[in-house]
Amino acid sequence: NIVIAQAPIERLTNIVMNSPNESLITNGAWAITNLCRGIPTPKFELVKGSIEPICKVLKMQLKDIELLMDCSWALSYLSERKNRIKAIIDTGVVPHLVRLLDIE
């Protein structure tokens, strides 16, 4: 929470959402996913801004399976409480998550 309170998610979100460079997008997304996990789970108020960039990466149909798994796990962590699931569903990412179930 100390690191997250310094607003790295805000900066990383800007990179993921606005960069034309796929490498920057994937590295930024990877960093964001790492900030979303942990014990104890980070405070939702500090990581809720990560939902949009994580969903963007999942919608990009990248071939980086590890990153797609990291993003999927991050959404899992972010949706642990019932009142948070709607924020994820509202991004339109669910069909993309279902598509990932077909990947071997």
Image (spheres, rainbow, N blue to C red):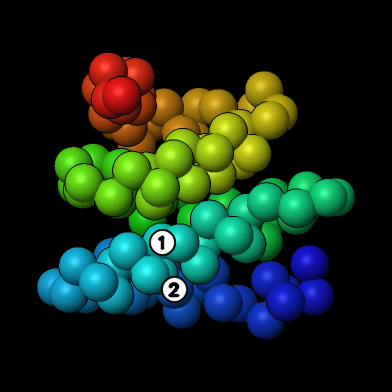
Mark 1–mark 2 CB contact (< 8 Å)? yes
- The answer to which of 70 and 5 lies nearer the viewer is 70
- Asked whether residue 18 appears in the rendered view, the answer is no
| In the image, farthest residue toward the front | 104
Residue under label 1, please give it.
29
Count the marks.
2
| In the image, farthest residue toward the right | 40
Per the model, the C-alpha gap separating discs 1 and 2 is 7 Å
Estimate the x, y position of residue 69 in percent, counting from the top left. Answer: 44, 40
Q: Is residue 101 above or below residue 75?
A: above
Residue under label 2, please give it.
12
Residue at 21% x, 48% y is: 62
Residue at 79% x, 67% y is: 1
Q: Residues within 10 Å of mark 2 (few under 14, many from 20)?
A: many
Residue at 67% x, 22% y is: 82
Estimate the x, y position of residue 45 in percent, counting from the top left. Answer: 68, 55
- Label 1 sits on a secondary structure element that is helix
